[in-house]
Image (tube, rainbow, N blue to C red):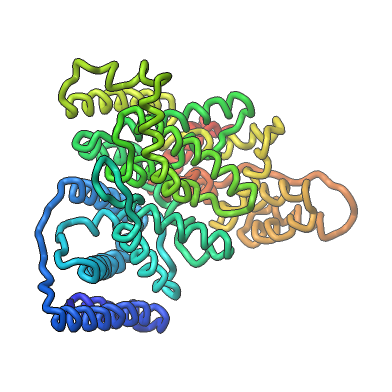
Amino acid sequence: MAIFALGLGAFGFLDTVRHTPPFQWSFLGAGALLLVWSGGLFGLAHRQRRRLTLELAVRKQHFVQAIAQLVFLLYWGWYWRQVYDSAFLIAAQLVFAYAFDMLLCWSRRDTYTLGFGPFPVIFSINLFLWFLDDWFYLQFLLVALGFAAKELIRWDKGGQRVHIFNPSSFPLAVFSLALILTGTSDLTWGQDIATSQFFPPHVYLVLFLVALPGQYLFGVASMTLSAVAVTYVFGLLYFAATGVYFFYDSYIPIAVFLGMHLLFTDPSTAPRTEGGRILFGVCYGLSTVALYALLGRAGVPPFYDKLLQVPVLNLSIQLLDRVAHSRRLRKIDPVALGRGLLVSRQRNLAYMALWAGVFALMSALQGVGDRHPGQWVPFWQGACSDARPSACRYLADMQLRFCESGSGWACNEAGILLDSADAGGAFGPFGRGCDLGFEPACRNLTGLTSGLGPFEFARAQPTLEDYPIILRGTKGPITDRSPEALYARACSQGWADTCAF
């Protein structure tokens, strides 16, 4: 055990860590805590003549989940290098997780089951939330809470004493709630994580594929299918009613899609009946929609929408199983409808085939994928002109993001949009646009500062310097920046006067 503690402390002497004292002490402090705990535990065990043992158990559920998560981490990291730069932090959390889990187990009983259990927990946590360097000690507390909840909070399920909560979802939800209540979301990479996961090309397809082995082996495809389907249907109805997209740039944000595949689908904390699992997925999808709306109205970063509800859903699984077996729902029990599929793996394949068909249809209809219209400026320009709900506000936010990234054209457009709401708010974007060399922004800034009264704002088409910024939408950076490629991309997105090039 001392090897784990000293190994964790050794991370504190890496060059990228030791120059930031709070960051360094996160590792040194966690290592010291493990060392003191292990010394006290083994000393007490020696006096009591307890024999602490290890039992090797490699469970398919753990390493299949871990492999799927690792593949996604590697793919995501190829397009957002911060993931690769933080790989040593994931390794440090794994060291801490194994040591903490062993010590907690041996503090309560004599045998620790050694396997791959900590891997999917740590990978899952790091798919959704990291703390910044100065606050990284909170990451270890987050991990500790997950394993403590798994060990200490249990109930009877099917005649067995098992943990109630998903050991990654529970601490994520608790810490998310704490960050919201204290207004300290900026202590984490949470928003950057949710945004950057859309950078890789074909990322929805990659997630669909990496989740297939787990869906086949553990029968969780029905959960993912129902969660995705209900969220997508809601998005279609919302668009039909308002003319804009509920999640703005997608029907299902990639971070939510990730949660529907690799977060809430832990079979150990899910309902056991097929009907219960379908209800579980429906509840996850609808609760994500509700949380996104509530968080947005409260002015809270919306990336918590797929994290907060999972522990509550874990508590509901036995109720959902009872509801699925109720007299009213028994007639449409999925298992009863598929009695001919006597082997559970056959039922799993049937659900996977249905899910594959739904995913293919959604992809063809741009329900998921890289080319959702809500990513592009022309859609929101049209929606703003038609005065659709929140369209002008979102367009202004989009233009401000592009302005900060260096587009003078976007700065000018943002200034014009902001002037209609608050003339004072337009000075900043016009000034930055002028600094970037976009002449209409300079004229508009001069007009505002002259104080001569109302005037017609100057506008112009984006330049070739603007297009690599404003054409990316919410995807990763554009690599092919040749004029031909940029104009072709602009034409496909619906930009005026670009298809002739």
Quadrant of the rendering where the N terminus is positioned: bottom left
Front residue of this view, candidates 487 and 183: 183
Report which quarter residue 96 is drawn in. Answer: bottom left
Left or right: where does residue 78 sit relative to residue 191?
left
Vertical comparison of 203 with 37: above or below = above
**What residue appears at the point 38 percent right and 31 percent down from the top-left corner?**
322
Front residue of this view, candidates 437 and 306: 306
Left or right: where does residue 384 sit relative to residue 61?
right
Front residue of this view, candidates 247 and 15: 247
Left or right: where does residue 465 sit relative to residue 9?
right
Q: Position of residue 68 (x, y in %)?
A: 24, 46
Vertical comparison of 249 with 446: above or below = above
Report which quarter residue 342 is drawn in. Answer: top left
Q: Position of residue 300 (x, y in %)?
A: 59, 54
Vertical comparison of 243 with 462: above or below = above
Q: Position of residue 205 (x, y in %)?
A: 32, 36
**What residue appears at the point 30 percent right and 23 percent down from the top-left corner?**
354
